[in-house]
Image (spheres, grey):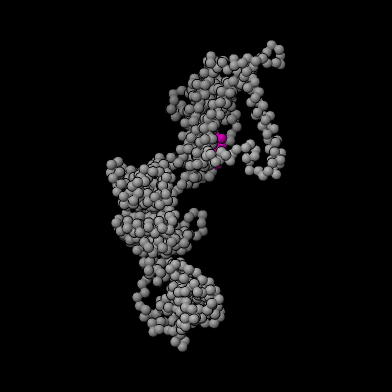
Amino acid sequence: MTARTTAANRGSWFSRLPIRAENRAYAGLFLGPTFLLMAALILYPLVFSVFLTVTGPSPTPGERRLVGLDNWARLGNDPLFMQSLTQTVMYVVPACILAVAIGLAVALVLNQEFPGRLLVRASLLIPWALPPVVVAAMFQWFLDGRRGLLSPWLVQLGVVDQAPSFFSGVPGTLFTLVGIHVWKTFPLIALIFLVSLQYLPRETVHAAQIDGAGPWRRFRYVAFPFLLPTIGVALIIQLLLTIQLFDLIFALTGGGPGAYSTYNLYFYAFKTSFEHTNLSYGAVLAYVVTVIAIVFGLILTRGGRSLRLS
Amino acid sequence: MAEVRLDGVNKRYRGLADDALYPTSATFKDGLFTCILGPSGSGKSTILKLLAGIEEVTAGRILFDGRDVTHVTPERRDVAMVFQSYALYPNMTARDNIAFPLQLRGIGRAERHRRVDEVAAMLGIRSTLDRHPRQLSGGERQRVALGRAIVRDPKVFLLDEPISNLDANLRMQTREELKRIHAELKATFIYVTHDQDDASAMGDEVVVMAAGRIHQAASPTEVYRRPADRFVASFLGRLPMNFMDGDVSVRDGSVMITGGKGPELVLGPATDAFHAPSGRVIVGIRPESVTAVTRDRGAAGGVEGTVTLTEVVPPDSYITADVNGWTIRARAAEVDQLQPGDTVGLRFSLPGLLFFDPDSERRLEPSAEDGASPKPEVAA
């Protein structure tokens, strides 16, 4: 930001809003309820959760006692925390790569003219629109080792000798969840790319074509550099979606099989807070997830800004 | 080098009721600089896109040197195109932009470097080669786009208003340069523009288009002096042509137009060479062919009119006069001394008169004796 804009931005944020002075009171009046709601639903829990992380249960019922940073220190010697963190990475990395690759490929196909394109574009969003529990139930039926649809097909087609088990392997089950999660989220990513492709300058693509570039090189030299900022944004969106993956784990594996093999940090925080009712440590874990999400969220906003500039 | 031919080519975009290009046959001669001139929506850019192959024809054939390329993809047509937007690759330097077609053809690095330098020297952009398009001025971008086309040594150059985004001075300079480049390369240039100055400055041949049809294809002087129809007559020229509806006759040694409304307009004494067309016509005469003289000069001859408007179009000045209800624009020598309301004498140069059929609006040849009436090359 230049010195001039900074100077213009001085003063309270409220006085900087494009609102005429005589209408300030109205503006306050209209914004008020929203602020109250936000304070009650976001600000209060945020402050309260800080309070939770520095307190512990007290012998007196209904009271909490200060424990300082003891809850935070517990992160250092909690093997399940390290396992959940590692497994979070195991969810995030393949989910980001797959969703962005598949989303981009699908967007490129849907950007072509072909009969029935509108129908295909519309149906693209079905996985994204389905409630997670429905998705979970669907895949449970589809992938079940004995009664599922997929296993008999794979055996009949000779792909595998015996019915594979999608929900009992370690770490196989985690990757089954990654697959289902990608299936559910790639439409959003594809849609982001499809929107971006609408702004790809046609003349530049034509110029490349006339210069002698076939489809692959037109993608490699024109579309891909153009989409690069969007790829960054898509990666971060998918990262945020995957860090917060919870419902599929909850509905399909409950964190198993084996010793917490499909836990991620988010799920671990939930378990700690609400099943082991250790609200303090659960809040600490939730904070770790929040910090990771905020860091990448900031990168996302930056990325979005540079996207608009280009 | 190639001769480019359209054989009954027709284009209609999907979902539109009218043809963007009605069935058209035309030949762009080998090694000539042909300008396609027309207002927006005339179909001139459509022709270029069809020739480049980035649009498919609805019907008809496109031939390069007799070879049917109608269904050949753009990457295999061996044409180069310069876009109005320049369409440079933003992530590549100017050098890489120019080298891109060579790179796609698998030409080695050293050879690419050499040829880019050669082209850059020709265009005077050697010092900008390491910059990205966003760091270049409009003129420099235009040159890089041109360089990208030239470096390939293609059979046909297609240029889509490549200089219309430049300022007036640079535009003039670039016209000269394009002309020089064309002379050096001796390739077939097809240049689309809505600017008649582009066409007359550069074109060996001008193809005038409107509403999806070719109206005339001839040399720049020919389309100006002998327009094929009323549209061409009105589209070319610095100022709008004067058009008058009526019957032309010679009475008492004077040529006059008798209109439906108001009294006749006397154009001046008839000469032996003058032959009046028969029946109702549209008479056209360019403002340049009508001279306005002030009365106090005592200039005899010509009809009197009242000045309604004066305008300066350097180096000339023009007035618009009302003559018995006819509105005539004429060239005036001393426009500074003229004001609306003044009386002037108008003298018409009879060889400058053009006659058009009121129905077809095509130009009528004055008479059989006039002889050599060259058929327009291209049938509309």
Is A137 inside the magenta-drawn segment? no
Check the image and report above or below for B335 versus A135.
Answer: below
**Horizontal side, residue B176 vs residue A238: left or right:** left
For this rendering, which residue is in front, A208 or B84? B84
Q: In the current view of this chain or complex, which residue is farthest to the bottom? A: B252
- What secondary structure do most residues of the magenta stretch adopt? helix
For this rendering, which residue is in front, B274 or A189? B274
Check the image and report above or below for B266 versus B225.
Answer: below
Which residue is rendered at x = 64% and y = 22% of the image? A49
Q: Position of residue A152 (x, y in %)?
A: 49, 27
- What stretch of residues is rendered in magenta? A122-128
**Horizontal side, residue B60 vs residue A116: left or right:** left
Q: In the current view of this chain or complex, which residue is farthest to the top? A: A59
Which residue is rendered at x = 44% and y = 67% of the image? B314
Which residue is rendered at x = 43% and y = 76% of the image? B353
State the image quarter where residue A9 is shown.
Answer: top right
Q: Position of residue A205 (x, y in %)?
A: 42, 46
Residue B315 appears in view = yes
For this rendering, which residue is in front, A262 or B122? B122
Which residue is rendered at x = 63% and y = 43% of the image? A18
